[in-house]
Image: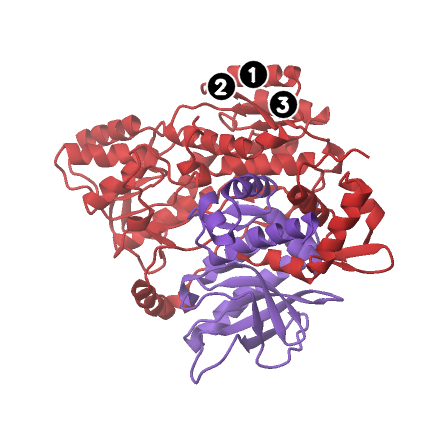
Chain colours: A red, B purple
Amino acid sequence: MVDKMRSNIQRISAVLKGFDSLNTPRSTHAIISDVSMSRSTGFALLRALVVGGWLERANHGFLRLGPKAFGLAFGSLDLPQGLGQSSWLVATARSNRNQAQLPELEWDPTLIETVQTEQFQKPGPHRIGFSNASLSNVWRRAMMQSVKYARYLRERQHLKITFRHAQDDPAVQISQIKELVKGGIDILMVSAITTHDADLSDYLAELAAGGLPIVAVDRRPKNPVSLVSFITASDRRIGRISALWMAEHLKGKGRIWMLSGRQGTSPAMRRQQEALAAFAEFPSLLIESISATNWTPESGGNVINDCLQKYGNPPDGVWCDSGLQGVGSMQRFFELGIKIPAHTGGDLNEMYRLGLQQKVPFVALDYPASMGARSVEIALDILGGRPVPRRVEVPVQIVLPRGFETENVKADRWAETHVAWDMPNDTILSQGPSLRRIGVRA
Amino acid sequence: MNPHEKAVDVFERLMASPLSGTIRSASQLAQSTQIPGSTVHRHAAFLESEGMLGKGPDGAFRHGSAASRIGLSAMGFGDHALRVEPILLWLRQSSRQTSFLAVIQGRTLLMGPHSNGRNSQNFSIRSSYDLDHCPDISYGSDNRFYLGERTENDRQRLVSLACVARSKTGVCVVGIFLPSAPENCATTENLLRSAQERFLQPANQ
């Protein structure tokens, strides 16, 4: 038998992964055969794993996961960080008072739907085609860095990812997907340009019907029926929490200008809907203007120019669904010598730097660019025949400068520790490990 | 030590490294495990690519999704692996309390994945606890326990547990740290019951 694994660490990982969810005992011969080990290596390694407590003997010739393996389940899913002990105590006392009024967050039942993927199982090395809407803003470039980091980790497994960026043109995106499929791919990752594009939706449904597994990342097509899984973040949470913070910070009254993202995209629409619903709970708040932007600083600044011309006085708050345009808004007030009003947004390092330097009240919920790497993991789980969630929401942290928490919006992390003073202004802080990975650039 | 025992030892040291929550690079990993840097670099990249190791929002190594699934499978509860993250995060965000999945064996609570809430950050979470009394956890009921040594008026370690599943090896529970103010416990335990129901729902495929 040919020993395909390069190291014993790889073999150990494969052995432990080979047990089912109920820890049904497996024969030593089946384990050795599945991991493609020689018999001598296989028996010696399994014996060492039993001695170490990672495996235990069930019946004669049968093994199952041992007591030490349970320790692998121990770990923090996400860690609110940078909140010092004294801050915790103050915040704890305050939030304990309000605990009884704490609103239950909406639950999305699709988060626990799973999809069986045995029919897509293929031996490696795997080929992924990624049809990306564009690289038109820094967030999209950070998401690509995250995807490339995932590829970098799998260099030794010869993972191939072919990228195509459609420059925000739906027709180009369809033709690029055709090109990817023609070139030969095992799975398609797609980040759709808009949710309104019926042609893209129909074409993806056709590909799915032909047996090609498809995952969407960040933005999904109009009809999700073609997707095995959709990797995103909770746009509803971003929209609702940011609006709730602004309403509470303004004590329920004042004038607000809303700067949404790119028109027609699913994240922008959902964030705006949720924000409007949250603002509607505060009848003394006036939503004076709602504008679409291109998720760029320039478009954010231009909207502020137009609004200042139209309304004269600056508003009490500027709600932005992202810091990509939010930073342009802050900059414009700063350049005009106007005190920067309360803002929402985040994402961009510059937004944090400017907000902290100018002592702007703001809340930030970074849309996690690390979803790029997560989508590669899901794609590889599908090609490995492992069940995957129908919808994955990468966690979103609430980031606030010290002293700006409100009754119902508390920080997961302080802006003062989240900002990267040593990194460029256009850094996207939510891209995960690729952030400081030299050599991984979009 | 033969090469296979040595490999198991290296694997064990690498997989134990996330427990400190402070290791952010392969070189720090090499230092803490006392394994040569080039070996660590190669193995850490592989384990990260396989989902055995991952990196948190702060860049520190932690157990990855595959490790979590193996861990739960070891107790016969692997079917819950894909639900753990969304349910525990929802529970933590709704309650601001630390939420967790754990397995009870006798009077020992083996801690699994958890999401740290800001109201229960005054002590670090350990991988196992002795419970202050022998649990009788049944479906549909919640149960309060103190984790670890209890001091007078110490409510910080008071948790509520709800049964999610049973296997030959133990009882799988979803749990939450209760707030310091007793009047707020009912709200928190209502949230816990909602989380329990979500774990009990049949898989929708």
Mark 3 element type? helix
* Residue A281 appears in the figure: yes
Are dots 2 and 1 on a single chain?
yes
| The image quarter in which residue A201 lies | top right
Q: Chain of mark 2?
A: A
Q: Is residue A55 above or below residue A186?
A: below
Q: Which residue is mark 1?
A: A176
The quarter in which the N terminus of chain B is drawn is bottom right
Horizontal side, residue B70 vs residue A251: left or right: right
| The image quarter in which residue A226 lies | top right
Q: Which residue is mark 3?
A: A202
Mark 1 Cα-neighbour bin, 10 Å: few <14, some 14–19, many ≥20: many
| The image quarter in which residue A205 lies | top right
Q: Residue furthest toward the right?
A: A60
Disc tally is: 3
Residue A414 x %, y %: 32, 52
Amino acid of disc 3? Asp
Q: Are marks 2 and 1 in contact (CB under 8 Å)?
A: yes
